[in-house]
Amino acid sequence: MRFLHDDPNPLNVLEIRELDYLPSNWEKVDLNLQNHWRVQYNLDEIRKWIYNNLQGRFCVVSDTGIIDNKMEIVYKIGFEIPGEATMFSLGCSVLHEASPAF
């Protein structure tokens, strides 16, 4: 949980914190959200979690990947600071909530 009395993040103020492409030297986390029926909501919650809990630049991009011999859409979350990828993987509540069994 963030304190509301923190100094503002300069990257947020200048609106350059989130990129629309994934640089090749950034640490990335691959997500397969095809089993979830509310993909866009989950991506918005992931962005909100990153803005509230991390400090560095990041990106959320979609790509195609082969999963179980099928081409599917895979979302890649990239982080400029490698330690933030670990923090995201361990702490993001969206990644760890149980998906509904419909």
Image: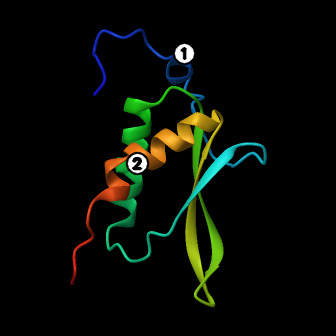
Mark drawn on residue 46? 2
Q: Residue 68: horizontal and vertical position, in percent? A: 58, 88
Three-letter code, disc 1: Pro
Q: Residue at x 50, y 18 (%)?
A: 13
Q: Tag 1 or tag 2, which sits nearer the N-term?
A: 1
Q: Is residue 94 left or right of residue 13?
A: left
Mark drawn on residue 25? none
The answer to whether residue 1 is above or below residue 26 is above
The answer to whether residue 75 is above or below residue 54 is below
- Asked which quadrant contains residue 6, the reply is top left
Q: Residue at x 44, y 69 (%)?
A: 33
SS of the residue under disc 2: helix
Q: Residue 10: horizontal and vertical position, in percent? A: 54, 15
What's the CA distance linking mark 2 and mark 1?
20 Å
- Asked which quadrant contains residue 53, the reply is top left
The answer to whether residue 5 is above or below residue 64 is above
Q: Residue at x 56, y 22 (%)?
A: 11
Q: Residue at label 1?
A: 10
Three-letter code, disc 2: Ile
Q: Residue 67: horizontal and vertical position, in percent? A: 59, 82
Q: What is the quadrant of the N terminus in the image?
A: top left
Q: What is the quadrant of the C terminus in the image?
A: bottom left
